[in-house]
Image (tube, rainbow, N blue to C red):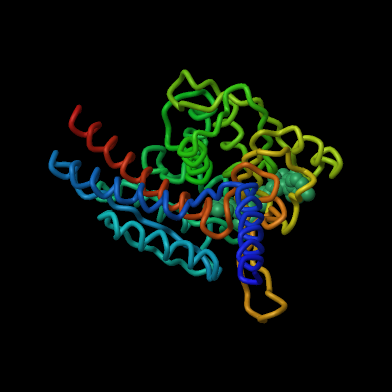
Amino acid sequence: MWRRSLESLVFSISRRYVAKECNMAQLIDGKSIAQDIRKQLTQELKELLTTGCPVPHLTAVIVGEDEASKKYVANKMVACREVGISCETKKLPASTTQEELLDVIAKLNKDPQVSGILVQLPVPDHINERTICNAVHVDKDVDGFNEQNMGRLALDMDSLVPATPLGVKRLLEHFNIETLGRNAVVVGRSKNVSLPMAILLSSDGRYNTKALDATVTICHRHTPPKELARYCRNADIIVVAVGKVGLITKDMIKPGACVIDVGINRIKDEKTGTFKLVGDVDFDEVRQVAGHITPVPGGVGPMTVAMLLHNTLKASKKQFSDRNSC
Ligand code: NAP
């Protein structure tokens, strides 16, 4: 008798557990999707080399000693090698002048062995970020930050698209998230992440960028918190790229919405005393309401790296085809 009641208790608890799990948002596992993309790129690269195209080469330039930047660049180099892209990192001291950095970029622009150039941001305060981004040759600008690539993106023309928003677009497509005519909110208006994200979400899908046709609201630090919550609650898709822990909470989410967390924040775990990475979204709470959600880490980050590789291959192909058509 007691055994039967124990079994029925276990059964009812597990059902409740399964039901609760089912109500949870579907996890967007960027790490595994990025891994698949890297495998595809490895194959694509092998095929490209059979056509006589030289091995693509990415040069990363890093100025100063920012630990996070060094780690990001090191990850990018590992990823390049894994798919067969040749790569190197030029490390310059924090005292490098803008003119010296421009000179390094000019040499890389002219070097026919170099197919992609990436200047890791942020650069030290005495260097103008926009001047540097614009100095990278448009065809080698694998970060897509050059004014010409940004302009082309805004005009629905084929271009090298910044890796993070391109990675987010790929995630939305992978999970068949409906975007056409849907409401999207982009939280943040930075030129390298949020602006190209808003363009990709709102532009006309019939053109070269194959954009997503959503109705987009952009929020920033002057958006009053009440308004931010109101816009978010009306959104089918939220992309947040701010760098503020716990900015997006459960009460701001429309049930079933897709929540993409670009933010990266390093916080101290009070229990263990160790540091960990979290996003801008209150993950544990929001996943109880959302339909889809990206984790941090393991969501957008790996896609950013995969899209950088994609851009390097794309740049290399274009340069090869331009040389052969001369
Ligand atoms: P950013 O240039 O510092 O931009 C942050 C944006 O957030 C700004 O536009 C700012 O508005 C806005 N903002 C600040 N407080 C706000 C608030 N309370 N409500 C709404 N908006 C607010 O940063 P970013 O380069 O775009 O990066 C954003 C975050 O994404 C960072 O945590 C970064 O580490 C992360 N990130 C992740 C990846 C990845 O691969 N996962 C890639 C790049 C960046 P104003 O313009 O008005 O100041």
18 vs 226: above or below: below
Q: Residue at x 34, y 53 (%)?
A: 58
Quarter placement of the N terminus = bottom right
Left or right of residue 266, residue 103 in this image: left
Quarter placement of the C terminus = top left
Q: Position of residue 297 (x, y in %)?
A: 55, 60
Q: Position of residue 96 (x, y in %)?
A: 51, 64
Q: Quadrant of residue 78?
A: bottom left
Q: Nearer the viewer, residue 240 or 323?
A: 240
Q: Nearer the viewer, residue 171 or 84?
A: 171
Q: Quadrant of residue 178?
A: top right
Left or right of residue 116, residue 56 in this image: left
Q: Residue furthest top?
A: 206
285 vs 94: above or below: above
Q: Residue at x 66, y 63 (%)?
A: 9
Q: Nearer the viewer, residue 289 or 141?
A: 289
Q: Residue at x 45, y 55 (%)?
A: 31
90 vs 45: above or below: below
Q: Quadrant of residue 258?
A: top right
Q: Position of residue 56 (x, y in %)?
A: 26, 49
Q: Residue furthest front?
A: 1
Residue 134 in sight: no
Residue 63 in sight: yes
Q: Position of residue 285 (x, y in %)?
A: 72, 54
Q: Residue at x 20, y 27 (%)?
A: 325
Q: Nearer the viewer, residue 132 or 143?
A: 143
